[in-house]
Amino acid sequence: ETGVTQTPRHLVMGMTNKKSLKCEQHLGHNAMYWYKQSAKKPLELMFVYSLEERVENNSVPSRFSPECPNSSHLFLHLHTLQPEDSALYLCASSQDRTDIYGYTFGSGTRLTVV
Amino acid sequence: AQKITQTQPGMFVQEKEAVTLDCTYDTSDQSYGLFWYKQPSSGEMIFLIYQGSYDEQNATEGRYSLNFQKARKSANLVISASQLGDSAMYFCAMRESPNTGNQFYFGTGTSLTVIP
């Protein structure tokens, strides 16, 4: 399988649940990203990982916890979320952080918090 | 201030006609990159076209071309000979100082519907 794969595609969770989003890339890329896409808002960068090290955290609440166990996998652990956290969560990867062209996105996880 | 502005929330175009999607940007950097992405209902963001701030010619990729007007800070996407499969959300994005690994700034998107 090639490209960036995100699972699950859809997730409904209660505010007290704990769940995880998974992102996997088989492109040999060294940088991976989590973005949040809310309706009628620009994409918001949440986290950046380069060579498995977190290099950027854009003031994201602690109820979102990323994990990058290796260069091919990225997780977003979720706990005690709020309804306003409902959104499409997109994962992306690039060869490295300075790669202009090579941003490859996954299809996203549609999260609904009830 | 918004870095990327897309003023058209929704656009309609007849099949086989051309359509222009507007994008203006705000930066004080001399070196930056401009991008257009397509997002079909499946959710995936698909890279369409790139324009570097120092590129003198407008970028083209098949039916896509970027009308780059640097002085006006605009980077409009032109889709020629629209097809039904072009119906999707379209996002304009900018990367400042590409060599320092700065993040992308995205616009709010334009929803394009191609009418048969």
Image (tube, rainbow, N blue to C red):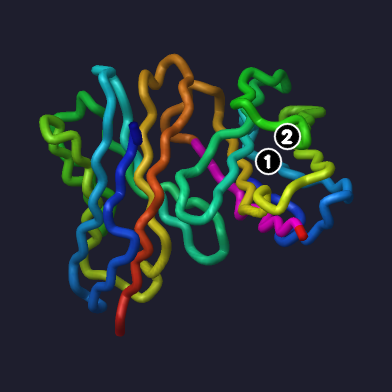
Residue at horizontal 31 percent and vertical 25 percent from the top: B32
Which residue type does callout 2 highlight? Ser
Q: Chain of mark 1?
A: A
Query: Tag 1 or tag 2, which sits nearer the N-term?
Result: 1
Q: Please give the range of residues in magenta.
A: A103-113
Q: Can residue A30 be seen at all in this image of the molecule? A: no
Q: Quadrant of the C terminus of chain B?
A: bottom left
Decide which of B116, B2 is in the foreground and name it: B2
Residue plotted at (41% across, 60% down): B89
Residue at point 78%, 61% (across, down):
A12
Q: Is residue A110 within the magenta segment?
A: yes
Q: Residue furthest top?
A: B100
Q: Few, some or many C-alpha atoms within 10 Å of disc 2 (few <14, some 14-19, many ≥20)?
A: many
Residue B8 image position (x, y, % from top left): 28, 58
- In the image: residue B74, left or right of residue B4: left
Nearest the camera: A18 or B60?
A: A18
Give percent across and percent down for residue A41. Answer: 47, 48
Asked if the magenta segment contains residue A14, the reply would be no
The answer to whether dots 2 and 1 both sit on one chain is yes
CA gap between label 2 and label 1 equals 6 Å
- A31 left or right, relative to A14: left
Give x and y (percent) for residue B56.
14, 30
Q: What's the amino acid at mark 1?
A: His
Q: Which mark is residue A72?
A: 2
Can you tell which mark lies on residue B25? none
Q: Are marks 2 and 1 in contact (CB under 8 Å)?
A: yes
Chain of the residue where label 2 is placed in the rendered structure: A
**The quarter of the displayed image where residue B74 is located:** top left
